[in-house]
Amino acid sequence: MIQRIQSLYMLLVAIVAGGLTFVFNLYTLESEVEIFAKDDYLYLGLFSASAVFALITIFLFKNRKLQFVLNRFNILFHLILLGIFAYRMLIVSGEIEISEKGIGVVLPLISIVLLVLANRAIKKDEDLVKSVDRLR
């Protein structure tokens, strides 16, 4: 289970989405207030859902197709997060509240890369099982 490389990738996604969002700030306002994911329920909900999906998919190692689909769903969560970040940070409304972007904005990109790597490994395992079944 954990010895498979895709399980390690998904564990890293759970750590990034579930733990590092509380360590790194998303952005800093002009009033020098740092905003973390825990300060906004939308960010917290999406990051938490992503971490839970990553942990659930680790234990679905016997059902590779479902694991693959849930990882794609998790990638969709992170793309939605990136869209929300872009919308909130690049909105031009006359007054810019966000003075500095934090490293937390990059966390969904890191998670997407890890999930894509996990999906490639799952696909590789699935192809290997199909090739072995063909030989029997």
Image (cartoon, helix red, strand yellow):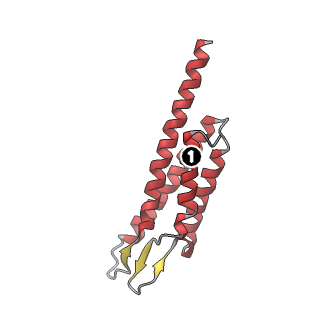
- What amino acid is found at the position of numbered circle 1 in the picture? Leu
Above or below 133: residue 68: below
Residue found at x 58% / y 51% = 11
Residue 52, image x and y in percent?
A: 63, 55
Give how far across and how far down residue 53 sits, in percent.
62, 52
The answer to which of 118 and 2 lies nearer the viewer is 2
| Residue located farthest toward the bottom when viewing the structure as drawn | 31
On screen, residue 106 versus residue 6, left or right, reads: left
Q: Choose between 13 and 53: the one closer to the eye.
A: 13
Instruction: Determine which residue is flagged by label 1.
Output: 8
Packing grade of label 1 (10 A; few <14, some 14-19, many >=20) is: some
Q: Which residue is at 47% across, 58% downward?
A: 108
The residue located at (45%, 66%) in the rendering is 104
* Picture quarter with the C terminus: top right
Q: Position of residue 73 (x, y in %)?
A: 55, 48
Q: Is residue 96 left or right of residue 7?
A: left
Vertical relation: 110 (above or below) 102: above
| Vertical order, 60 against 80 (above or below) | above
Q: Residue visible at 59% across and 44% down?
A: 7
Outermost residue toward the front in this view: 3
Element under label 1?
Answer: helix
On-image quarter of the N terminus: top right
Q: Nearer the viewer, residue 1 or 98?
A: 1
Write down the quadrant of residue 122 in the picture: top right
